[in-house]
Amino acid sequence: MKRLIILALFVFGLTTVSKGDHKPNTSFQSTIETKVYICYSPSAYVYPSTLKCSGIRNCRHEIYEVTLDEAINKYGRRACKLCY
């Protein structure tokens, strides 16, 4: 029974609204539109959040500004541990 309740809370928690706020949770939408940077190199595997990060400053190839969704799904990158 506890597992069913936890599962229901998890499923319904994704679209719930907080107390006093009557807007749906839109954090997922804003995350997709977030701009990040990638080094277009065969050995690069992260996406830093700023150009000031040493993870992108050391790039010797082209640097692209892409959406977070593109960085993850199109280029297969993960978050930079120095930035996030």
Image (cartoon, rainbow, N blue to C red):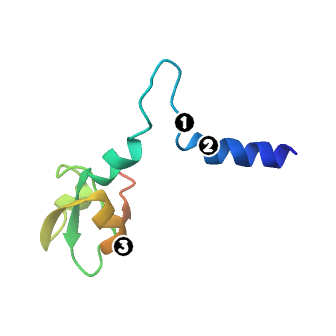
Q: How many numbered marks does the figure carry? A: 3
Determine which quarter of the picture holds residue 2. top right
Taking the spot 32% from the left edge, 61% from the top edge, the residue there is 69
**Left or right position of 65 against 27:** left
* Residue drawn at (59%, 40%) of the image: 13
- Measured as percent of width and height from the top left, residue 3 is found at 81, 48
Residue 43 spot, x, y in % from top left: 30, 78
For badge 1, the amino acid type reads Thr
Above or below for 43 versus 21? below
**Structural crowding at the residue carrying mark 2, measured as other residues with C-alpha within 10 Å and reported as few (<14), some (14–19) or many (≥20):** few
Instruction: Report the residue marked by disc 3.
Output: 76
Residue at mark 1: 16
Verify CB contact (< 8 Å) between mark 1 and mark 2. Answer: yes
Lower position in the chain sequence, tag 1 or tag 3: 1
- At x 19%, y 64%, the residue is 58
Secondary structure beneath dot 1 equals: loop
